[in-house]
Image: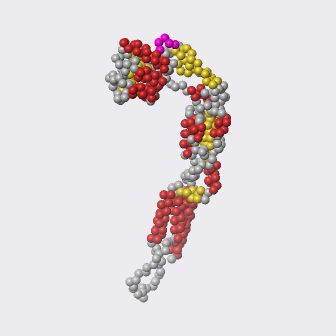
Amino acid sequence: MSLDWLRPAALAGLAVIAGPVLVHLLRRQRAPRVTFPTLRFLVPTRAAAATLRRPSDLLLLCLRVTIVAAAAIAAAQPVFVTTWRHAAWERRVARVLVIDETQSIGAAVPRVRDVVAAERGGSTQVSEIHTTSLAEGLKQAAAMLRRADAGRAEIVVISDSQLGSLTAADVGALPPEIGLRFVTLGAPRRGATFRGWRSFHAGSAPAVEQQITLDGSRTRIMLIASKPSAREVTFLAPRERAEDVAVLKRVVAAAGAPEMPVDRGLTMIFPGAVLPAVEPLRVLWMVNALAIASADARLLAVASAHRGAPARSPGTPWVPLARNGSGQPLVLVAAANQNLVAYVSAAPSELVAAAALRSLLFAIVPPPNWREREVERLSASQLAGWTRAAKPSAARWTPQPPGDARWLWGLALLLLLVEGFTRRASSSAREEHAHAA
C-alpha cells in the first residue's frame, strides 16, 4: 500500500496548528483568591516568581490541534493506493466506438444503433466517434484513450469493412496495450456498375464517358459515347487566336481531362482580350480549386520553364496561380459571376496554356469517391489478425479528486462537535468552582 497526495501544497496548512498552541500558552491565568486576616507579618521582597506555564486545558488543545491537522490533510486530498483499489482500476475498461458513416453503410444504420447499445452495456466509459475515414477515427480514438481514467482501453470499429478502409499501418500505429475489435455490418455485394467521369471533348469529337464494372476482385472500364455537358469552358482571346484556342482544346482532350460539371464554370482569358470585372475568390469550391491547382507539379514545372516574356499582369484581386522562372505571375485566377476566371499571360498555343487548362479542370471537377464504390471487404482472417484483447495500461494509476479526503473531513466535523461539548463542560466546571470559592 502507498499514499498519494492530489494537492500536496495544501499540507502547508499544518502550520496553522501553531495558532491553537499559542492561544493556550498565552491565555491569561487568574490566581486563586485566598482570604488572609492581615498583611503586617508579610515581608516585602523584590524577587519575582519565574515559572514556565503549562498550556491551559490540555484536552481542548489536543482536540483543536487534531481538528486543524485533519482539515489540512483533507485539503491535500490523500489517496491510499491499496492492492484491491489498483486491481479494481485495472478492471475498468474505457471503450471508444469508431462508427463508420460512409454512404455504403447507409442501409445498416438501424443495426448500428443496436450494436452501439450492446457495446455500451459492458464498459465503464464509452465514447463515440462518427467518421467517414476509419484511419482518422483510429487516431482520434487513441488520443481519447490516452486521457481515459481506466486500467484497460479498447477500440471497437463498427463498419461494413470495405477493402482499403483500413490498412496494417493504420492498425500498427495504435499503442500495443489498446484492444481492438471489429463489428462488420451489412450484406456483402457481389458487384456494381456505375459511371465514372466524362472526358473533356473538343470540336466535333463525341463526348466519352466511363462505365466502370466491379465484379469481385476484377475491374472493367468501358468508354461509351455520351451527350456533351451543357456547361463548357469559355475562352476569351483575340479573334486571330481562334485557331490556337481550337488546337488548345484538342490537345487537352487528347491528353485526357474531365468535363466541366453543370454547376461550376471556368473562363480562360488570354492577352488581348477584354478583361471582365472580377472579384476575390470567396466560394469554397473556387478556393479549393486554387489550392489543388497551385500544388500541381506539372503545371509549376511548365510555368517555370516558360521562356517568353509574360504580358502585363492585372493587379488586385487577381491571385497568382503559377509563376515563370523569374518569379513573374504567369497564370492568375479570380471570380466573376460565380465562375472561376483564369488569366494566362501567354498565347493559347503555348504549352503553359494547355497545362493550366488541364490542371484547372482536374481541380474544379469533384474527385469521385472510389472507395465508396468498392464491393470487396476486408477478409475475416485479416480482421481476426488485427483483433487483440485490451491489456493493463503501462501508465501508473492517477487518482482522481477527491480521493480519501471525505473521511478526514468527516473526522474533523466529528471532533469539532466533541470540542464544542468539551468546551461547554469545562466552562461550566470553572463557573461552579468560582461560585464555590
Residue shown at 55% from the left, 53% from the top? 402
- Percent position (x, y) of residue 288? 46, 28
Rendered view: 125 above or below 251: below
Rendered view: 254 above or below 417: above
- Percent position (x, y) of residue 166? 59, 35
- Indicate the quadrant containing the N terminus: top left, top right, bottom left or bottom right: bottom right
The foreground one among 302 and 361 is 302
The foreground one among 135 and 251 is 251
Is 225 one of the magenta-colored residues?
no
Left or right: residue 167 compared with residue 256: right
Residue shown at 39% from the left, 85% from the top? 45
| Display colour scheme | secondary structure
Left or right: residue 225 compared with residue 232: right
- Percent position (x, y) of residue 151? 61, 49
| Observer able to see residue 186 | yes
| Observer able to see residue 424 | no
Q: Residue at the bottom extreme?
A: 41
Magenta part of the protein: which range? 202-206
Q: Quadrant of residue 85?
A: bottom right
The foreground one among 137 and 58 is 137
Left or right: residue 202 compared with residue 111: left
Q: Quadrant of residue 242?
A: top left
Is 203 one of the magenta-colored residues?
yes
Residue shown at 46% from the left, 71% from the top? 25
Residue shown at 63% from the left, 45% from the top? 390
Q: Residue at the top extreme?
A: 204
